[in-house]
Amino acid sequence: MLLSPANEDPMAPCDVVPEELDVAIAVDRFETLTTVKVARISHRWAGLRSFVADRSPVAGFDPSAEGFFWLAGQGGYGIQMAPALARAAAALLLGRPLPDDIAALGVTAEALSPVRSALRSQVVAPNRSP
């Protein structure tokens, strides 16, 4: 089972480690909302995640840096969206249309673009995620 307190604590890029309090919060929230008790924690992990102004992922070529392809801004949903976003990014990288099942959900290359209007003059900010 994978648990997270879903916190967003701004911090500078670093080799982040799980905070004991964040681990305890995740366990407490899980036990409070379910009938399952956590007997032991076998692994703990923390990582940095990034968000952009509109809190949506970025996938596409940067027009100001030839050959540079953005794949960022996955925030706290990276694990959940990784398979679909990877397929979308691969299609964009190869100059192909988005996969039909992804496009059918309303996702467009423009919505993922690093030059979409919501991101102009914005900076990606790192956050920590246990």
Image (tube, grey):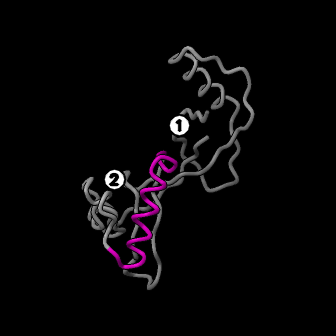
CB-based contact (under 8 Å), mark 2 and mark 1: no
Above or below for 66 versus 22: below
Amino acid at circle 2: Asp
Residue ID at (74%, 25%): 40
Above or below for 78 versus 63: above
- Mark 1, residue position: 7
Amino acid at circle 1: Asn
Relative depth, front residue between 106 and 57: 106
Q: In this view, does 44 lie to the left or right of 100?
A: right
Q: Is mark 2 on a helix, strand or loop?
A: loop
Q: What element carries label 1?
A: loop
Residue range in magenta is 76-96
Picture quadrant of residue 104: bottom left
The numbered disc on residue 54 is 2
Picture quadrant of residue 123: bottom left
Residue ID at (69%, 39%): 18
Residue ID at (71%, 44%): 17
Q: Circle 2: is it few (<14), some (14-19), or many (20+) Cα within 10 Å?
A: few
The kind of secondary structure the magenta stretch mainly shows is helix
Hey, which residue is sitting farthest bottom in the picture?
A: 66
Q: Is residue 129 left or right of residue 91?
A: right
Q: Distance between the residues labelled 2 and 1?
A: 18 Å
Relative depth, front residue between 39 and 44: 39
Above or below for 108 versus 21: below
| Magenta stretch: includes residue 88 | yes
